[in-house]
Amino acid sequence: MPEIPVVPVFWHFPAHPASVRRARRAVAESLPCDLRPHLGDDLGLLTSELVTNAIRHGIRGEDGDLVELVTWSADGHYWLAVSDPGSGKPELARPGVDSESGRGLILVDSLAAAWTVRPRPTCGTSVIAGLSFHPGG
């Protein structure tokens, strides 16, 4: 008999800066207790960076714009997908030393075991990042 997978956890938040803190707290509270010591800080940082980027760069400016988050575990990783209605494709940048922003995906790239950007089936973009279950893995 096949192993039944864990049901992903899903949230949606208004496209507003106050949602970054709410999203980070929701994701942290949903993380299984045995994974919190190993993944809690990194998952919180990934959540903050990706939700902030979605709000700054992926929102169309329409009432009702939402940022969606999904978390799930699979293949020895804990995955986070942050989606927005925008059509842009986030790219890793190399900001200048005096730049005050532009380092979010650099942090994602250094923390995540793997990450990618995918278009959504109907509209929008998702950034998906995975953290290994194992410290140092």
Image (tube, helix red, strand yellow):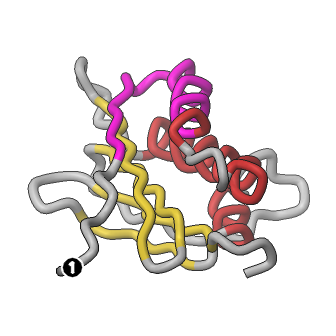
Q: Residue at x 51, y 66 (%)?
A: 129
For the view shown, which residue lies furthest in the right direction? 97
**Quadrant of the image containing the C terminus:** bottom right
Where residue 125 sits: x, y (%)? 30, 57
Tell me: 112 left or right of 2: right
| Up/down of 21 relative to 6, above or below | above
For the view shown, which residue lies furthest in the left direction? 122
Where residue 103 sits: x, y (%)? 72, 58
24 and 90: which is toward the camera: 24
137 and 68: which is toward the camera: 137
Amino acid of disc 1: Pro
Q: Residue at x 61, y 68 (%)?
A: 131
Residue 16 falls within the magenta-colored stretch: yes
Residue 134 sits in quarter:
bottom right
Tell me: 36 left or right of 84: right
Tell me: 58 left or right of 60: right
93 and 135: which is toward the camera: 135
- SS at mark 1? loop
Q: Disc 1 designates what residue? A: 2
Disc 1 residue crowd, few under 14, some 14–19, many 20+, Cα 10 Å: few
Q: Residue at x 60, y 29 (%)?
A: 25
Where residue 107 sits: x, y (%)? 72, 62
Where residue 35 sits: x, y (%)? 66, 55
| Up/down of 83 relative to 68, above or below | below
**Quadrant of the image containing the N terminus:** bottom left
Residue 126 sits in quarter:
bottom left
Q: Which residues are magenta?
A: 9-27
Q: Residue at x 35, y 34 (%)?
A: 11
Residue 69 falls within the magenta-colored stretch: no
Tell me: 91 left or right of 113: left
